[in-house]
């Protein structure tokens, strides 16, 4: 059984099987992949193991440029996040920037707690602590822990989208070539991504209702569905 094996050795053998399967399914897959990347989506998400962007989007290697950190915090002075945004938006010229939080986020729970996490983690979570303070009244009124954690995750995405929309490179790309910014939340319990409507086009609700925008990757496509102009007011 996989559980009894060394996890790293199991991962390597799984990779071997995956590579064999992909090459069998499409003999040109890896040679095409090796020729370069032209992803249409920049994904900014949480490091949580349950939120692997390419997998949950049903996309493939080559489709999504990625930066993930603890609690998907977008801080303008974080050179790591900023460099990824710069490269993806200015050089790769992605068409969509997706900032996605998620339910049951450990970072959100830590920010809602009054105890220290320890080490550098409290410093990292400071912007999320500020989000908590800013929305303390609404958050404190939510009795259910999971619902409160989801609400602060939504506020966190809202704050992150504001930082993205204030970024010069992002602003120029929106103005010059119609870059779209989306603020989303991944519901782990259902596997669905919900557009929160904090971005450039307003919300589109849960994935899977109606039909709107199709992003074609090299090997798959992502469909943003159900968008309508009346939701733009949520911005
Ligand atoms: Zn998280």
Image (cartoon, rainbow, N blue to C red):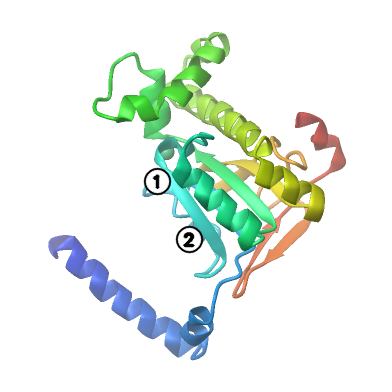
Under 8 Å from ligand 1: the CB of mark 1?
Answer: yes
Q: Residue at x 76, y 39 (%)?
A: 202
**Residue 163: % across, % down:** 61, 33
> What residue is disc 1 on?
47
Res 55 label: 2
For the residues carrying marks 2 and 1, which lies nearer the camera in this image? Answer: 1
Residue 107 appears left or right of 83: left
Residue beneath the point at 42% across and 35% down: 105
Q: Which is nearer the N-term, disc 2 or disc 1?
A: 1
Is 15 displayed left or right of 179 in the figure? left
Tell me where residue 52 appears, x and y as whole percent.
Answer: 44, 54
Residue at figure coordinates x 68%, y 41% from the top left: 168
Residue at position x 68%, y 46% in the image? 170
For label 1, the SS is loop
Pinpoint residue 101: horizontal percent, then vertical percent.
52, 39
Placement of 26 over or under 49, stated as above or below: below
User: For this view, does 116 lie left or right of residue 97?
Assistant: left
The answer to whether any part of residue 226 appears in the image is: no
Image quadrant assignment for residue 58: bottom right
Q: Is residue 75 left or right of 105 when viewed as pictured?
A: right
The N terminus, quarter of image: bottom left
Q: Position of residue 89 (x, y in %)?
A: 64, 54
């Amino acid at each position: 059984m996989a559980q009894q094996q060394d996890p790293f050795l199991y991962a390597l053998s799984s990779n071997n099987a995956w590579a064999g399967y992909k090459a069998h399914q499409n003999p040109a897959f890896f040679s095409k992949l090796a020729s370069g990347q032209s992803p249409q989506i920049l994904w900014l998400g949480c490091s949580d193991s349950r939120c692997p962007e390419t997998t949950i989007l049903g996309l493939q290697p080559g489709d999504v440029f990625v930066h993930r950190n603890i609690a998907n915090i977008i801080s303008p002075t974080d050179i790591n996040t900023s460099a990824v945004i710069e490269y993806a938006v200015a050089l790769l010229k992605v068409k969509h920037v997706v900032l996605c939080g998620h339910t049951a986020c450990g970072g959100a729970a830590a920010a809602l707690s009054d105890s220290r996490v320890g080490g550098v983690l409290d410093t990292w979570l400071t912007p999320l602590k500020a989000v908590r303070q800013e929305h303390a009244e609404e958050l404190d009124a939510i009795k259910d822990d999971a619902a409160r954690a989801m609400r602060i995750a939504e506020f966190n995405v809202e704050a992150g989208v504001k930082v993205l929309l204030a970024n010069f490179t992002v602003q120029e790309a929106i103005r010059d070539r119609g870059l779209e910014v989306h603020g989303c939340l991944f519901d782990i319990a259902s596997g669905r991504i919900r557009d929160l409507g904090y971005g450039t086009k307003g919300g589109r609700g849960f994935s899977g209702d109606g039909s709107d925008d199709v992003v074609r990757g090299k090997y798959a496509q992502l469909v943003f569905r159900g968008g309508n102009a009346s939701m733009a007011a949520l911005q």
